[in-house]
Image (cartoon, rainbow, N blue to C red):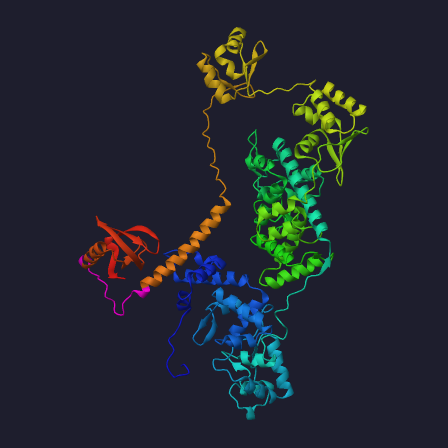
Amino acid sequence: MSSSGRTTPARTLADQLRSWPDERLVALLRARPDLATPAPQDSSQLASRAATRSSIHRALDGLDRLELSVLDALLVAGQTTSADLVSIVHADAGRAAAALQRLLDLALAWEAPGGVRALTGVADAMRGMPGLVSGLRPSSPEPAPPDVVAARIAELSPAATALLHHVDDHGGEGTTGSARRTVSPAEARTPAEELISRRLLVPREGDAVVLPGEVGLALRGGRTTREPVDEVPPLATSARDASLVARTAAGAAFDVVRRVELLLDHWGVQPPSVLRSGGLAVRDLKAVARELHVDEPGAALVVEVALTAGLVAEAAAGDGTPSWLPTDEFDVWSGLPLAERWARLVGGWLASSRVPSLVGSRDPAGKAWNALAPELSSGLAEEARRLALQVLADLPEGEVLAVGTGIASLVRRVGWLRPRRPTVFADLVTAALSEAAALGVTGAGGLPPSGRHVAAGDLPAAAEAIAADLPRPVDHVLLQADLTAVAPGPLETEVARRLHLLADVESRGGATVYRFTSGSLRRGFDAGWSSVEVRDFLTSVSHTPVPQPLEFLVDDVARTFGTVRVGHAEAFLRADDEAALAALVHDPRGRSLGLRLLAPTVAIATSPLDVLLPRLRELGAAPVVEAADGTVRVSRPDLQRARTRRGRRPAGAVAARQAAQVQAVATAIRAGDRAESSRPASAEATTTPSGALAALREAIEAGSTVVIGYVDNHGATGERVVDPRRLDGGRLSAYDHRADDVREFAVHRITGVRYA
């Protein structure tokens, strides 16, 4: 009843949502995209309820401790006014009011005529979180005023008061034992009977009693909690020069880009095999660590970042073995400026669900995690990275995390922001900070300007910001007589690639030291270099003369290189008739087969067997296949198929699809509201087949909008707001306002027609 004595019409959450403007409705769907996922048309009511529960849990997972406490207070107080709700939350009134507004925006709470109330289903979802909420039970349907409850508590004996506090501290529920359930205060003999007689404990089914919410509030001084719930854990910080932070981050960014280049250059020539269960073998990861001069966790991060950036993928090597190979994108990426290459790596890492920090550890079954394994992922990894960077971005410039205690304080802050996340979330946040430092997103415990752009999701701006701080590459080295070369700074990409081919990295730091050995120079000769080309390259990149020991080493390797020759042959031919075999080898029509005599009765071919056999038959020969034991083998070729490769969806396509989906849901809601508002007080829809056809023809002629009842393919009946355009052959062509497109409807499935 209202204050004037008139009955207030019931207002549902659906009514409130209909009154929202389109902008606010779209914002809700963006904040809770799970609401935009339509349920199957043939789903049962049970499945619909399960989807609703899942939607509520997703929304609760995004709340911080203050917002959860406000929602918990709403469940304790029941339907109440905003002012009364804010007054029972142990927090600053302004911050509590802002938290309540966010709950309203997420549709976890809504404003009814009698006050604010929680969405149905929230109470069930909030159970089982004793450490995150107050633990109070809901208030009674008609609670006593606070002063009355306080007076009843003041009348208790010390034993009854202690019992009441004990029940409050242990979940608000107990048992009556031998206490009587119906007794007056004057007849109460035990502490339990004192509490029951004064309605401070309320009996429930069996011998259970519960502590009403209004009593719990009185015991806690009118608040749902004894401690403030809006105190955000502070960050342990220290002062540090902002330029040092930027330079440290830029140095790490340069290193990770260079290591990815060296890794994929090496894998392009010697790709590692893919394990049968997927992933990279432990020995191959150790080889990567030796090649890049990093530890195994660092090597795992490099290969995982290359994967998330789309620069490496599983493919068949030259011999058909599944291997990890650089993708075509690697060639495009290599030609970009250094800052853009770094931004591409960071963007892949930030949006990825991969967890490189697990490499080397063991799963619950005791099996070690391998790098690049398909299962090495977590749905919480991306959120952990973004939250960690957002918290760091809140620090003012010149402030960084304190050494030793800073990371722990940030983990506590993230725990306050996402209290419903599992305990593994803290490990993911810690790993995200370590990975961000290795990738150059952070530096010296703080965020440089480029890192702040990464936290905001603006990667082009991040690349532009870090470009000025990246080390300037040099184009020369200093050759020394001990067969080493010292690079006085980071080398240009092409110089570094060539030098890495001819020498091994001995040490890194401010200056990189390369060592020339017989094995390292042999790599260059294997790649097609000659001794003259090696000398010319060393002369061109060195600011010092080429030492004589290095010249002797180059000449010695060149002299011994190629003394043993190995050729390539796909097949061999053996014949007793020397003349017939020689005629085949010298036949002009068989030049493309690559035939070459090794002996009068033996020849080899560079063409594979499946190509060689039909071509030899075309040349007039009648060849047969010889097995390894010398016997003749006759077989038919097996059918082979290539697996269709699925292209990567462009990043913009995902955002466009989500935006279209959100807008489609908003359009469908508006169309449903229009259909509902056009329903007359007494249904006057034309339901006979002839009457429906006549009404549709009139609507086509008049260009009117009608509401049709329609039975879909699953037998479900619904209403559609349509503009009829054509009626022909038992099919109605009309513009469907819900689908925002022209659709066709079977006339025999139309159950009724009325004007909108």
Q: Does residue 584 appear to the left or right of 261 in the view shown?
A: left
Quadrant of the snapshot with the N terminus:
bottom left
Residue found at the far front of this picture: 468
- Residue 186 in which image quadrant: bottom right
Count of numbered labels shown in the rendering: 0
Give x and y (percent) for residue 223: 59, 77
Write down the region rendered in magenta.
Answer: 676-690
- In the drawing, does residue 734 fall left or right of residue 392? left
Residue nearest the viewer, comparing 499 with 65? 499
Residue at the location (70% across, 44% down)?
Answer: 251
Is residue 279 in view from this perspective?
Answer: no
Q: Quadrant of residue 340?
A: top right
**The stretch drawn in magenta includes residue 683:** yes
Name the magenta segment's main secondary structure. loop
**Residue visible at 49% across and 63% down?**
56
Q: Quadrant of residue 430?
A: bottom right
* In the foreground, 136 or 13: 13
Most foreground residue, 159 or 81: 81
